[in-house]
Each structure stands twice: as structure tokens, then as C-alpha cells.
Image (cartoon, helix red, strand yellow):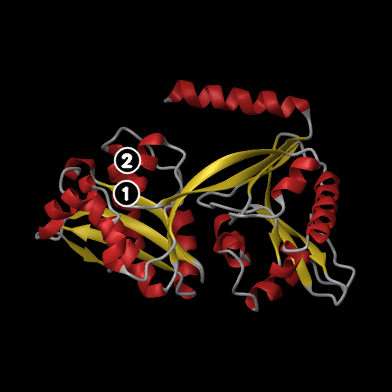
Amino acid sequence: MHTICILGNMTNKELYHEFCLNNSDLPLFMTDWWMDAVCAGKQWDVLLSFHEDGSIQAALPYLIRKRLWMRYIVMPQQTQIGGIWLREDVANTPDKVTTICQLFAEQLSALKLHYYYQHYPIHSAAVEDMRTLGFTTKERITYRIEDLSNLDKVIDAFSKNKKRQLQKALSLHAEMNMNVEDFYRFHVRCLHNQGKQISYSREFLLVLERKARRLNQCQILSICNADNEVLAAAFLVWDKHSMYYLIPCYNPQHKDSGASALLVLEAIKLARQQGVAFDFEGSMIKGVANHYKQFGSTRTIYYSVEKYYKWYFWFANAYNWLSERKMR
């Protein structure tokens, strides 16, 4: 479903594409090229709010999925945030935020959805208004290091355990020449060794890497031993504000090598070179969260915003959750 803008005969997606070309302040995960990449083969669109002068002052990009007769909005794969983006001057004007949230809530209802679920940006001014409008909000956690200007100070904040791991990794080195095919195979192998399956396809990663590489917004980083065997690797992406530790993977056979700690340190160094903060991109999993906290990161809250438009979709979600639990 494409929404036609009253300002002309361009669709919202076309207007948003033009907008994204000229607005580098947008969070990476809400840009048109990111949505094109992670929603390849699926239907995505965007709700827009316009200022009196015709400029875009707010946007809500979304992926719409279908299951049987049901229509629902959920987060795309490997996408930390979505929801409502607000221009800075609008975000600082509560009455405007309320009006925009009311508009978007009405437009979401007009999509005849059965369910809505998105993660809103950190410090989003829209969360409280969406809660007031009948949406359910829940805390989510990521871990961030905001100031990387003094690398010695950053490393000094690491836990004693992580510092010991870095000492173990003195014989290892970082490489930035791993290609995307090799990275995918390495991730598959790492998960297989843990009895797990990969959650995204090779084609998905190829499309994402190609688009991000063209814009110089990604890097594959690997940690190798003296024989150039890869022990750990990460797919990193960034915008003008943050670098995201999007897809890290470690060979469990080398868990005592210190490779995982060195991988994080080298990723932090890359973020510092880019002049941006470092975001671990989660996690809500206790063990992973503890790993990230030990790098001196700050626990940072953002929110999911959710609504069941049809009561029976709750049962469909519950059934899928139970089925997944049984398969583990």
C-alpha cells in the first residue's frame, strides 16, 4: 500500500528517498537504503508528516508482513530501531509530537493491521504519546560507549577479566580483508559448533553488505592467529552518530584465546576513527549483556511500542513462541 502525498503525485516512499539523500542525521536503521536492503523481496513503506512549508518533519518507515489473512508490522531482520523519527525542532515541541503521534496512530489504524511492533529510537520523544494512545511500551536494553576520544581511558574502564583476555590475545592480530561470503560461512560454522542455526540468509547479507559498502558504512573485522586462522569476526555498520556491533561471531573452539575481547577493542578503535559512539546493539540476553558491560559500556534504555488490533493475533504469537521453544 503506497500513500500518496497531497503535495504532488509522488508516493511517500519516493518522497522519503529524496529526503534521505539530503538528510544524514537520520538513524542508519531508518534510512531508505537500509529498508531496501533488509526488506528485499518484502513490502515496506513509510508514513510521513509535513511541516507547513512542505518539508518532512516526521517519518515512520515500516515493514508490513502477511500471514494468511493477517497483516502486521514488525521489525526487519538485523534492525535495532525503527518507529517514529522526529526532526530535532519538532522533538523539542511537545504539542507537535502529540499531534504527529495522533496522526500516525490514525494512519496505522487505516492500514487495517492485526498487530504492530517496533523499537523506537533511544530518547524518542514519541514513546510517551504512543503509550497514551493505547500502545504498550516495554523497556529494551543496549550498551554504549559514548566518548571514545581517549582510548587509554576507554580501555582502563574494561573489567579485570577483559584485560586478562586481551593479554591472552597478544599473539593475535586484526584483519579487515575478510569478504562477505567467507564471513557468512564462518558464522554458519561457529553456530553449527554450538548446535545452533543461522537466523539470516546468505542472500540477505550479500544485499546488505553491497548497499552499505557502496556508502562506506560497513566493515568486516576479523581476529586471526599466527597461522591466519579466523577465530572471531564482526560485521560492523555505522551512521554519523554511532557504530553498531551488528553481527559478531566467535569460534567456540578458541573461546579461551582472548579473540572475543580483542574483536571488541578493534571495533572500538574503528568507531573512534569514524568519530562516532560505539553501540553493542543489545543485548537482552543476560550472558551477552554481562559480556558487553565488562567493556565499561553504559546501560542504555530504549523502548518497544506494540499494539494488538485483533485479539486473535495474540494467540497466533503465543502459539509461535511455544512452537519455537519446543524446537530449541
Residue drawn 39% across the image and 52% down it: 297
| Quarter in which the N terminus is drawn | bottom right
Q: State the separation of the CA atoms marked 2 and 1.
A: 8 Å
Which of 242/155 is in front? 155
Using the rendered image of the protein, determine whether residue 221 is visible from the camera's viewpoint.
no
x, y percent for residue 196: 35, 35
| Quarter in which the C terminus is drawn | top left
Residue drawn 82% across the image and 68% down it: 50
Give neighbour class at mark 2: few <14, some 14-19, many 20+ (Cα, 10 Å).
some
User: Does residue 105 appear left or right of residue 196 in this picture?
Assistant: right
x, y percent for residue 55: 79, 74
Which of 237/262 is in front? 262
Instruction: Examine the rendered structure and indicate whether residue 204 appears above or below residue 92.
Output: above
Furthest residue to the right?
6
SS of the residue under disc 1? strand
Residue drawn 78% across the image and 30% down it: 310
Residue drawn 86% across the image and 47% down it: 110
User: Does residue 84 appear left or right of residue 98 in this picture?
Assistant: left
User: Does residue 85 appear left or right of residue 222 in this picture?
Assistant: right
Going by the numbered disc 1, the residue's amino acid type is Cys
x, y percent for residue 244: 44, 59
Which of 76/29 is in front? 29
Upstream in the sequence, badge 2 or badge 1? 2
Cβ atoms at labels 2 and 1 below 8 Å apart: yes
Give neighbour class at mark 1: few <14, some 14-19, many 20+ (Cα, 10 Å).
many
Going by the numbered disc 2, the residue's amino acid type is Leu
Mark 2, residue position = 191
Mark 1, residue position = 249
x, y percent for residue 31: 61, 65
**Total labels drawn:** 2
